């Protein structure tokens, strides 16, 4: 029997179709069928200037838009031989981590919906709104800030924003405590998630998994620590969380701990923002010298990388985007084989992907 999950299903976070072959209730094979939301962003970047490209890039992982901009801007800066001032680097890192909190907090609530618990997602929307308000206060945009610039940032942080953000981080730690009480200590949630969708570390690496999905399989790898791309993560104390089990519960647990850790990173960065300019000296009209560069960062969903090729024009000659969701969803045929129909949604929810991140 063939069972189609999607292409329009709440658990797929967009238009993704999973074609499952069943033997009774057991999954014999599962094939992810993508492309329903393809928008051709890589090709469109070839006919845009560098500042215009950030407008497109915002719309890849639309729940963590600012974080999408950073590796592309860093690649362009690398080609130009430009480095953003320290103040801009610290503010970039703060906004990057706020994007992570806004993105992952929605997962922490939505995962409850996947297993039948409605209350957590309302808590998630309530508290995520506070983080979005802080992002909007600086950038002017809630979902698509388009705030990063080659050489720095569009503007500085407003007066009073640091104290407000400290207060929001305290509330988000309270939100994490609520999610821990509501879900992680819940017997039904544990039964639905433990030993479900197990991905061992070697399998995770062979399929190119990254981010929390990789660390939940026991692989201690985080680009913020292991390949710091030039932001301020190495200026503060923080921890990389891993879990040995590799199941749906482990993926939830790691993301919960990382959200807590992100609030601590933001608090430390807020207290240490250096003074100075927010923009380096760059031409008003950007022409990037000929060359090529690849920069990747630890985005909310995993490793987001941009391979940028320039021929010296106003825009890139070629942009190849390495998105985490595209690689993370590739493990679906392996992890679904032998599972049962009620577990399909749990596994998809725990892998946590955004369709704009897959169909770009």
Image: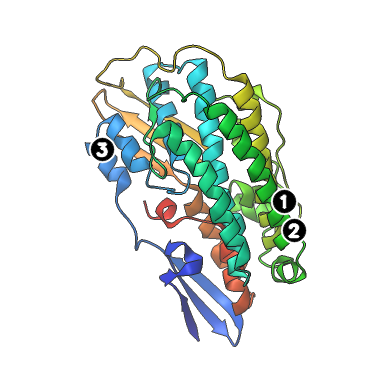
Q: In this orientation, which residue lies closer to the viewer: 241 or 220?
A: 241
| Colour scheme | rainbow
Q: x and y percent of residue 240 in the render? A: 70, 39
Image quadrant assignment for residue 235: top right
Label 1 environment density (alpha carbons within 10 Å; few <14, some 14–19, many ≥20): some
Of callouts 1 and 3, which one flags the residue occurring earlier in the amino acid sequence? 3
Q: x and y percent of residue 352 in the render? A: 55, 57
Q: Please give the residue where the numbered disc 3 appears in the rendered image.
A: 46
Task: Give the side of residue 71 with respect to residue 189, left or right.
Answer: left
Q: Can you say whether 56 is above or below 84 in the image? A: below
Q: Is mark 3 on a helix, strand or loop?
A: helix
Q: In this orientation, which residue lies closer to the viewer: 31 or 83?
A: 83
Q: Please give the residue where the numbered disc 1 appears in the rendered image.
A: 177
Of callouts 3 and 2, which one flags the residue occurring earlier in the amino acid sequence? 3
Q: Which of marks 1 and 3 is in front?
A: 1
| Residue at the spot 71% in from the left edge and 28% down from the top edge | 237
Task: Give the side of residue 89 with respect to residue 73, left or right.
Answer: right
Q: In this orientation, which residue lies closer to the viewer: 197 or 187?
A: 187
Q: x and y percent of residue 45 in the render? A: 28, 39
Q: Please give the residue where the numbered disc 2 appears in the rendered image.
A: 181
| Residue at the spot 54% in from the left edge and 23% down from the top edge | 90
Q: Can you say whether 52 is above or below 353 in the image? A: above
């Amino acid at each position: 029997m063939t069972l189609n999950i999607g292409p329009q299903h709440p658990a797929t976070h967009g238009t993704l179709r999973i074609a499952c072959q069943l033997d009774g209730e057991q999954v014999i094979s599962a094939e992810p069928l993508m492309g329903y939301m393809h928008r051709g962003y890589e090709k469109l970047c070839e006919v845009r200037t560098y500042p215009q490209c950030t407008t497109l890039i915002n719309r890849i992982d639309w729940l963590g838009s600012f974080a999408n901009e950073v590796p592309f801007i860093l690649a362009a800066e690398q080609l130009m031989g430009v480095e953003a001032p320290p103040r801009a680097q610290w503010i970039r890192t703060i906004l990057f981590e706020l994007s992570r909190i806004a993105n992952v907090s929605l997962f922490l609530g939505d995962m409850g919906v996947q297993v039948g618990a409605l209350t957590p997602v309302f808590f998630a929307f309530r508290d995520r709104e506070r983080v979005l308000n802080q992002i909007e206060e600086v950038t002017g945009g809630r979902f698509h800030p388009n705030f990063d610039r080659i050489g720095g940032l569009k503007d500085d942080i407003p007066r009073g924003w640091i104290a407000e953000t400290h207060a929001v981080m305290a509330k988000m730690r309270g939100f994490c405590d609520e999610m821990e009480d509501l879900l992680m200590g819940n017997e039904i949630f544990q039964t639905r998630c433990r030993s479900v969708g197990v991905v061992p570390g070697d399998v995770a690496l062979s399929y190119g998994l990254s981010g929390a999905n990789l660390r939940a399989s026991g692989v201690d790898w985080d680009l913020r620590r292991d390949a710091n791309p030039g932001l301020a993560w190495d200026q503060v104390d923080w921890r990389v969380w891993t879990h040995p089990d590799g199941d749906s519960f482990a993926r939830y647990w790691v993301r919960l701990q990382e959200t807590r850790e992100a609030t601590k990173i933001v608090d430390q960065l807020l207290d240490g923002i250096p003074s100075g300019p927010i923009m380096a000296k760059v031409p008003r009209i950007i022409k990037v010298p000929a060359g090529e560069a690849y920069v990747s960062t630890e985005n909310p969903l995993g490793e987001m990388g941009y391979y940028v090729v320039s021929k010296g024009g106003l825009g890139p000659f070629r942009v190849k985007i390495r998105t985490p969701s595209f690689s993370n969803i590739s493990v679906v045929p392996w992890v679904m084989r032998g599972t049962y129909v009620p577990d399909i949604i749990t596994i998809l929810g725990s892998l946590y992907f955004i369709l704009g991140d897959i169909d770009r």
